[in-house]
Amino acid sequence: QPDGRVHATWSDETSSFTPGRLDLMLYSPLSLEVARSFVLDTSDLDSDTLIAQELLGEDTALLSDHLPLVADFQVLK
């Protein structure tokens, strides 16, 4: 989440499995540095943010049972 509190990328309320961090983003730390990263869950965003970003609260749930990873990378010289 943009607030940095949730790191689980998979969840299923009907499953006996605990939500967890199943998805990864691979990169070389020799050429890239992560400037900012988060797991996007639109159901956790407030209505002002949803409107500003042209999103709906159910967008990530409709997309997949895995949540998207978002990262800004800085290219190292």
Image (cartoon, rainbow, N blue to C red):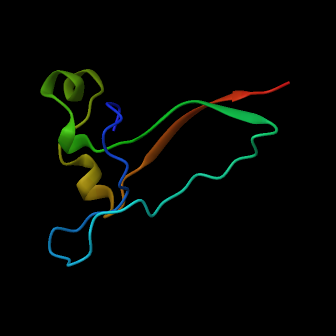
**Which residue is rendered at x = 68% and y = 32% of the image?**
33
Picture residue at 65% right of the left edge, 52% below the top: 26
The single residue placed furthest to the bottom in the displayed view is 16
Placement of the N terminus among the 4 image quadrants: top left
Above or below, 42 relative to 36 = below
Q: Give the side of residue 4 with respect to residue 55, left or right.
A: right
**Quadrant of the image occupied by residue 74:** top right
| Residue plotted at (82% across, 39% down) | 30
7 shown above or below 47:
below
Residue 65 point in image, percent of width and height: 31, 64
Please give left or right for residue 52 compared with residue 28 in the image: left
Q: Is residue 43 above or below residue 45?
A: below
Which quarter of the picture shows residue 48? top left
Q: How many marks?
A: 0
Query: What residue is drawn where x is 31% and y is 45%?
Result: 6
Foreground residue, 52 or 44? Answer: 44
Residue 12: image location, x then y, percent = 22, 68
* Horizontal side of residue 60 vs 7, given as left or right: left
In percent of width and height, residue 54 lies at 27, 29
> Horizontal placement of 53 versus 30: left or right?
left
